[in-house]
Image (cartoon, helix red, strand yellow):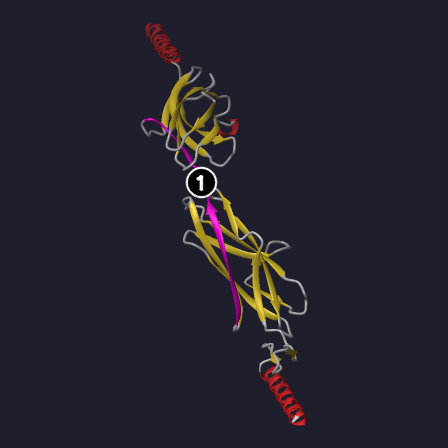
Amino acid sequence: MNKLAALVSIICAIAVAFVSVWLCITSPAVATQAYHKDGHDLPVLQDAAQQEKIELTCQYPVLSSYAGLNYAFDINLNYTGGKDSKIFDLKATVPEGFNYTISPGYGDGKEIAAIRLDPIKGYPETVKLTVRPYVWKVPLPGEYPITMEASSGDIKSTINLKAIVTANYDMKITTPDGRLNTEATAGQDNNFIIVINNTGSADLEKISVGSKASNRPSGWTVGFKPEKIDSLKTGDSKEVLVTMRPSDKTIAGDYQMTIEAEPESKYAYGSLQLRVTALTPTIWGWVGVGIVVLVIVALAIMFIRFGRR
């Protein structure tokens, strides 16, 4: 009886071994394990080959910044399980109002659409996915989902990323009546009003108002009161008195000048291009009239004298 039991055990062990070998040959990626009749584990052959796959990872998958800036994600691509290198196509899906570029993680920043990966290398390759809003469309504050995919035939993988727009910093310079032209008398102080508007979704701090020498006619002086605005809340506006003095030698005509405003953070910028019509002082008009009268009188006297001869 003992011999019969021993024979049955041997036959069962041989059968289990045969099944395990068959499974490893037909499906090498599946690890198998057999058991004795008494419940003890019997280790069998483990998978002889690793499954071919690609994995995408990112250390910082969620980035946040204010509107108008770029979002740069460093993506690691790890290709394993294959025998030879493969070329993987790279693409991303971004929200409306954004575009993207993919470039090597290290190098000259050239754009790429595919990458060759070697499974024997033992470490992942890195690419940089840069997502940026269109310059003419500033995104509203909120969360924007992004997806990147790497694929080579049936082997593919994706990674979900997110860009968070925390605030929209924006400002504009206008005039109370909307006019973009004014008049200024040469050699005199001329005053007019401009309005600084916070049109963004966040407060602006320490706004400087000015006009660079390169942005106004030579010899003109321009002053602002106040020159700096401590704080301007969202939707608020502030009037600024501009005092402009054209030089005494300014010739009558139209001139261009630009006024600028920018917070200390430099997150926003506003400018106003103004057309200024320069006028000569009234006294010079009377001087001109006097000169014309003197010329006429002198000609009349000469005509009378020479006429008698």
- Residue at 46 percent across and 42 percent down: it is 166
91 in relation to 65, above or below: below
Circle 1 residues within 10 Å: few <14, some 14–19, many ≥20? some
Residue 20: in magenta span = no
| Residue 183 horizontal/vertical position (percent) | 37, 22
195 in relation to 185, above or below: below
- Quadrant for residue 11, please give it: bottom right
Q: Which residue is mark 1?
A: 167
Q: Decide if residue 193 is on the left or right side of residue 230.
A: left
- Residue 194 can be seen, yes or no: yes
Residue 173: in magenta span = yes
Q: For the residue labelled by badge 1, is the local secondary structure a helix, a strand or a loop?
A: loop
- Residue 279 can be seen, yes or no: no
Q: Amino acid at mark 1?
A: Ala
- Residue at 33 percent across and 30 percent down: it is 178
Compare residues 291 and 203 and report the one nearer the observer: 203
Segment tinted magenta in the rendering: 155-176
| Residue 120 horizontal/vertical position (percent) | 67, 69
112 in relation to 97, above or below: below
